[in-house]
Amino acid sequence: MLRARRGGRPRADWQVPATQAALVVGFFALWEAGAAAGLLDPLTWSQPSVIATQVVDLIGTPETVHDLAATLTTLAAGFLIGATAGIGIGVAVARLRRVQAVVSTYLVALQSVPLLVFYPVLLTIFGLNRGPTIIVVAAVTMVPVALNTTAGLGAIPRGLQRLATSLLLSRTAAYRKVFLPAAIPLIFPGLRVGFLAALVTTIGMEFIVASAGLGYRVGQSYHTFAVDRMYANIVVVCALAILVNLVLTRIERSLRRDVTT
């Protein structure tokens, strides 16, 4: 299939993905050739062929299953807590317009703070478990969700507000049945950013402080100079991130299609 391009000349749909695939294949081919020729330090670089073998060996092993379960448990708990809190804060701020500017300023400031610095305090309070990590993950999720929820509810057309009034809906019912569904096109990108930030934070925290999880396994391989295994675990982490992003992209497109149709 061809699509029109600027200047009236058609552009094949396959050109962009084909170019992207060629760049990826070329990169790994150069990497493989450089490693095989001894041009790359084996203590720093592995070979893509060896990494692929290690990835196959990792898939389905009890160790990988345990690490994946630990990572997903922390990620899910932190994201759900943060998303719930973020939507609640966004609704409260949207309803209290007088404090909107003040609270939004604090949320933006919180977004720029490396929340990992609070880990020692949380460790003192909650002890040596996954609780402090979950709280940090929830915090990084909460901020973009709260900001986008506030923005989405603030952009509700006056026509929908009059509709809610004409239906004699209570304030709570109006938000649940009219305003929040209408704000989904702006709320969901916040959820998406929050989820990806939660994933990055979970892996990073596991790399530093955890005793299980995909991030922990990358760190363990690094500290024991198991370079091949380290890159294999990195591939697993990247595959998880790509899968999550694809799923979220599909969900977002579906929601936007439902709203616009």
Image (tube, rainbow, N blue to C red):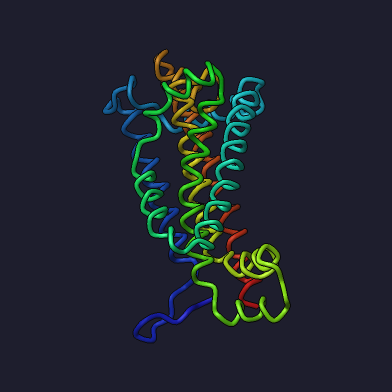
| Residue at the outermost bottom position | 8
Find residue 178 and report its horizontal and vertical position in percent.
Answer: 66, 70
- The N terminus: image quadrant: bottom right
Find residue 170 and report its horizontal and vertical position in percent.
Answer: 70, 68
| Residue at the outermost left position | 39
User: Is residue 208 depicted above or below 9 in this figure?
Assistant: above
| Residue at the outermost front position | 98
Find residue 233 and report its horizontal and vertical position in percent.
Answer: 50, 28
| Residue at the outermost top position | 224
Given residues 127 and 10, the one toward you in this image is 127
Res. 153 visible in picture: yes
Seen in the image, is 199 located left or right of residue 223? right
Res. 254 visible in picture: no
User: Is residue 255 depicted above or below 158 in this figure?
Assistant: above
The residue lying at 62 percent from left, 20 percent from top is 63
Given residues 177 and 190, the one toward you in this image is 177
Q: Locate residue 71: give its quadrant.
A: top right
User: Is residue 163 depicted above or below 193 in this figure?
Assistant: below
- The C terminus: image quadrant: bottom right
The residue lying at 42 percent from left, 53 percent from top is 103
The residue lying at 59 percent from left, 25 percent from top is 67
Find residue 118 and report its horizontal and vertical position in percent.
Answer: 40, 28
